[in-house]
Amino acid sequence: MHDFIERLLSGEVLVADGATGTNLQAAGLKHGGHTEEWLIDRPELVLELARAFVDAGADIILTCSFGATSIRMEGSRYEGKVEELNKRAAAIAKQAASGSSVLVAGSIGPLGKLLQPYGPISAEEARRAYEQQARALVDGGVDLLIIETQYSLEEAQAALDAARAVTQLPVVVSFSYDRGTRTMMGVKPDAAAMLFRKLGASMIGVNCGTNLENGLAVIREYATAAPSFPIWAKLNAGLPRMEGGTAMYDVSPDGMAEFAIGAIQLGARVVGGCCGSTPAHVQAIAKAVIGFRRAASVAGPMGQDPRL
């Protein structure tokens, strides 16, 4: 059985890392640029950030491959190097996790263009782009895949179908609810949870989004719609505000730790941070989760999903 699934079955609550993009922007990445270009241009800084998350106590770190599909990389300096970018992303994350029990999740983000009939991308084009990325991440040695920041059931399903065509590794499907408890395409948490449980995803998730209160509401809807379906929760450190052209996030590390415990109490099995979440935020989350684990060990194992 896969280590990630074994750890979920054991009742362990896992800590995921924080933000990639906003932290690399703080290190000098041009705002609005392709984060993945630093896999070639500044790999030492990508590695430094990943190691900082490991040192902070993350159990899972994500690859710097969120936008590394052929569709999203169109017009970039590294267009046509999708396989190299994803394999580099996996190698850097694996190097950061080397010698530890930290798992590496291959990050697969949205294509940046809507699927037909709302946009120019056909379902088959989406599936091919996602399959190319998923295969490269798997070949690079990731432990699981995270299809994240999704807003359309159809695009998320294309990504899951593509992943399943190349691997039997665990796959998490996570949505971004930037309209409160609805995605920009109107997806409801209950619909997402029921569909992707039926399709065989390993977990349903919520990431990015608006504020922490809405994130907790989404988790509550997930848990109600699909009881015992494991939940991944990786929210922004609050809503961003612009200050001198820079996005600032106001939720403190302690605030993110409080959110993590609330998410766990509602059913989350993986907790972490998204935009604005630094290694300090992850460290606070990890400390809070350690306390929760100790309390849980006294109270007994958490409910398990017999489907896993």
Image (cartoon, rainbow, N blue to C red):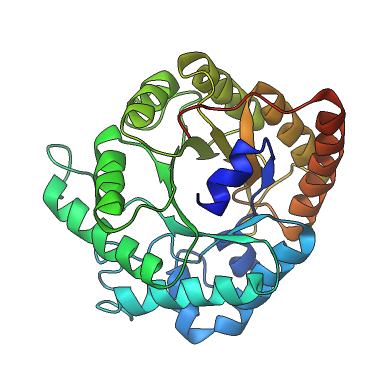
Q: In the image as oriented, which residue stretches furthest toward the top?
A: 224
Residue in the foreground of this view, choosing between 203 and 110: 203
Foreground of the two, 229 or 133: 229
* Residue at 74%, 52% in the rendered image: 282
Residue under the image location 45 percent in, 29 percent down: 307
Image height of 1 relative to 264, above or below? below
Picture coordinates of residue 273 (x, y %)?
65, 47
Q: Quadrant of residue 293?
A: top right
Residue at the extreme front: 1
Looking at the image, residue 241 sits to the left or right of residue 89; the answer is: right
Asked if 199 appears above or below 77 in the picture, the reply is above
Where's residue 78, x and y in %?
33, 80
Q: List x then y, in percent, for residue 275.
A: 60, 51
Above or below, comparing residue 291 to residue 162 in the picture:
above
**Residue 234 location, quadrant:** top right
Q: Name the residue at 20% across, 52% down.
A: 127
Residue at left 24%, top 78%? 80
Residue 205 point in image, percent of width and height: 50, 36
